[in-house]
Amino acid sequence: MTADLKVRPPGRAVSAAPPLRRSRVAPPWWFVLPALLLFAFVVLVPSARGVYYAFTDWDGLDPDFAFIGLRNFIDILDDGDALQAVWHTLLIAVAVTVIQNGIGLLLALGVNSMIKTRNFLRVLLFAPAVITPIVTAYLWRNLLGPDGAVNSLLGTVGLNSWQQDWLGDPDLALWMVVLVVVWQFSGYSMVIFLAGLQSIPREIYEAAAIDGTAPVRRFWSIVRPLLAPAITINLMLSIIGGIKLFDQVYALTGGGPGHATDTISTLIYKDAFTLGDFGYSIALAVVLTVIVAVVSAGQFTVLNRNEKAAS
Amino acid sequence: MNRYTKRTFVLEMVMVAVGIVFAFPVYVLVNLAIRQPSDTSSPIRPTTSPTFDNFTGAWREAGLGGALINSVLVTTVSVFIVLAVSALAAYPLARSAARWSRGTFLLIMLGLILPFQLASLPLYQTIRDLGLLGSIWSLVLFYAGLQVPFTTFLYVGFLRALPRDFEDAASIDGASPFKTFRYVVLPMLKPITVTALVLNAVAVWNDFFTPLLYLSGSDQQTVPVAVAGFVGQFVSDWNLIFAALLISIVPVLAVYLALQRSIINGFAGGLKG
């Protein structure tokens, strides 16, 4: 493999000369202003207002709205559909994270070998990750339909009894969402794992091979600890991406059948723009924010500890 | 262990099989996009008498031409803005250890956690009050702000690992801070800029939720919104829909294949900071 998949700064801070502290002119603080203002206007201020609106009965239009305390949040706890959506969101996030990273790691090990098609496969397997998610979801909606290619394929190999309306079955539809996300982003996980694998010096690996260490043992004791940063990034990306999932559900099932695949994000959209219930919708967004924050903080702590322990 | 053994051959066969499984949906996409609507044979059987009518029909009906122009415009302008302001901001944030600098950095990093759903509804109201609903400039503004935390994070991480010597030399020679940034710091940031460019461009180009909100009810659309509208309109005319999906994918795949190494390295590299 010729490509070194890491972007490195052109030089490290290695200076033999005595430090020239006197000459250091700090760049002016106002350099941050353009970025800070854009960020404040688009993210910070609206988010703060969002948290406030979550405690009101705002409908998105009427300037006269009332402060109603925890009403919206109590309503969420009473709302079976909302609780289901929270459950679906977590289930999708966990399932996608486990399956996508499992497949991604196997693919990375595969294309990191001596096989002749490794470069071609790397480009092919990563390709879905750059395609617009809404487009891949519409493609899969047809593939998984009653007359779709998946059923045709099953028919061709004699598994006619497996043929069904994959997205029409409430028990299966959620897993089809997971399937589509995994198909699209396994290559993404692969690329990050591959960068991690290629940063492992060959000598270490070869030394272990010469010593007669079994492949599984080699993977567990040498590759896995050195892969820790790639694992951290991959888990973060896939779990947060899974929690925020919207496009794929919107295009594949629209949250259906019934509410079988609704996630927090699709409910936020429906409550605000089809029901006009902005206050309630924003309260759901606050719930989503809390889940993302808790998961990121928890994951960061655990993985950071493991990464330190491994290195 | 660098030899091509029998086991390598078995692995090669397994990986090629996996590749075929991954490529299968795209095969069906192309196969149905070139098929006449009257042809009702199995979707996996190769199309015998291909036609291009679906493409011309989809292009005309979906308004993909205008949508492509909008998507290119929104992506280019917003990514340019976000790279410029983030690189500029990263310079003092990476170099100053003052309290305001650390505080500002943490504040901006808060944006990495906040899901955009929280900000998008109140911002919807502001955009409406400004009369920007239905205008693609609302999207440019949105992405320029939304992508600041992630891009700044990349730049600051990269800049911290760079030596200060060149900047110091420039300022000793009397260069102004802005000149130092423009002619000394910025060129050194090139590798991470490629990464940030790739990741931001893909994120902006592919976004569906934001234009769905901010452009709804107008005649302006981006590619994802045009595709969704088209699917809603031609519910079961799948040959036509697949042609539209394929048209929307081709520019992305063309760029990807042309710049595959930079793009794959961008995805892999930036995240390792």
Image (cartoon, helix red, strand yellow):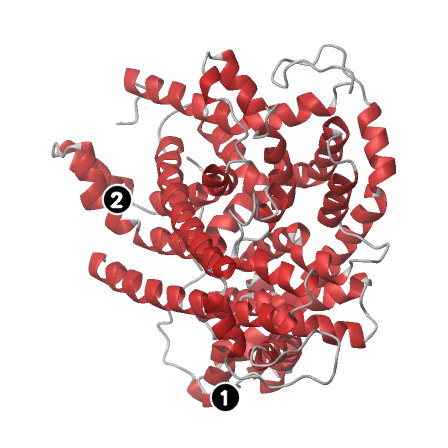
Residue B127 position in % (x across, y down): 76, 72
Q: Chain of mark 1?
A: B
Mark 1 and 2 residues: CB-CB less than 8 Å, in contact? no
Q: Which mark is residue A223?
A: 2
Which residue is under mark 1? B100
Which is more toward the observer, B139 or A58? A58
Q: Chain of mark 2?
A: A
**Mark-to-mark CA distance, 1 and 2:** 41 Å
The kind of residue tagged 2 is: Val
> In the image, is B88 to the left or to the right of B60?
left
- Count neighbours of disc 2 (C-alpha within 10 A) and say few if under 14, some if 14 to 19, many if 20 or more: some
Identity of the residue drawn at 41% across and 57% down: A236
Please tell me whether mark 1 sits on a helix, a strand or a loop. Answer: helix
Which is more toward the observer, B90 or A145? A145
Identity of the residue drawn at 46% across and 37% down: A172
Identity of the residue drawn at 56% across and 38% down: A128
Which is more toward the observer, B183 or B50? B50
The kind of residue tagged 1 is: Trp
